[in-house]
Amino acid sequence: MKTDTRLAFSPALGHDLEHRRYSADSGVADGAQPILAFPSMNGRVWDWENFGMVESIRHLIDAGRVTLYVTDGIDWQSWTAEEKPPAERALRHNDFDRYLVDELLPLMRAETGRATVWASGCSMGGFHSSSLFVRHPELVDGLLVISGVYRLSRFIGEYLDPSVVAASPLDYLSGAVDPARLALYRRARIALCVGQGAWEDEMVEDTRAMEAVLASFGIPAVADYWGHDVNHDWPWWAKMLPYHLERLLG
């Protein structure tokens, strides 16, 4: 497996941001599925590597089936920045969305030759991956969320404005969705996985709500609830990731 670390200035964010690419030793393999992964809440670009997530799918990367991109986060500038009003946090998240759509995803498409990517993340990383999917289904046609957060009320209470609704997967999907967008959602491969052990209660609630909304629109998705011994923590996430990724890849 080859690891490339890139640090570049982001016009959308106004500062440097790092991402890492994990590919087969020979480089990006023809036919490899590009996947964009997000760190968990207030996490950093190296967390997926340090907590065993990259190693858990090394066999898929080495075999040329997956090329993994992991982006750094900016949660402390947006949703977890408690000193900022909710509207300001939402606008900063929009900057992050522009970074992804206008800067990182075009790079991924250029390097892999694929018009679309999959997105993945755990906990708050699940929020970011599902937010990217619901906002841009023309760019993201696969979603693997583990112990995901799908709404923003735990960070900003009941505050809603158009930027919050656009960012929040459950709020966005609960509104009217046009047929063309529904068709894009329905083509995607989607898996939602969550444990039922320690620190997972809110994530189980969000996952059940997300499962119900997707089903109400006829959007196929696998919702998988692991046991009451499965906690909200990296060792379990590193088991869930290859289990579901291999199934999504077929």
Image (spheres, grey):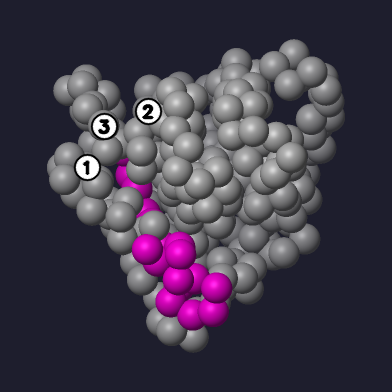
User: Is residue 4 left or right of 61 when viewed as pictured?
Assistant: right
The magenta stretch spans residue 202: yes
* Residue 199 higher or lower than 242, as above or below: below
Label 2: state its secondary structure: loop
* Residue 6 higher or lower than 208, as above or below: above
Task: For label 3, count other residues whose C-alpha is less than 10 Å away and answer few (under 14), some (14-19) or many (20+).
Answer: few
Residue 44 x %, y %: 76, 48
The magenta stretch spans residue 88: no
User: Is residue 4 left or right of 189 when viewed as pictured?
Assistant: right
User: Is residue 100 left or right of 142 when viewed as pictured?
Assistant: right
Question: Is the Cβ of the residue at disc 2 closer than 8 Å to that at disc 3?
Answer: no
Which residue sits at x=63%, y=41%?
A: 79
N-term-proximal mark, 1 vs 3 = 3
Give the residue type at disc 3: Gly
Nearest the viewer among 118 and 9 is 9
* Residue 220 higher or lower than 140, as above or below: below
Residue linked to disc 3: 175
The magenta segment is 188-205
User: Which quarter of the figure has residue 75?
Assistant: top right
Indicate which label's residue lies in the foreground, 1 or 3: 3
Label of residue 137 in the image? 2
Residue linked to disc 1: 219
Which residue sits at x=74%, y=40%?
A: 83
Give the residue type at disc 2: Pro
Residue 7 x %, y %: 84, 29
Label 3: state its secondary structure: loop
N-term-proximal mark, 2 vs 3 = 2
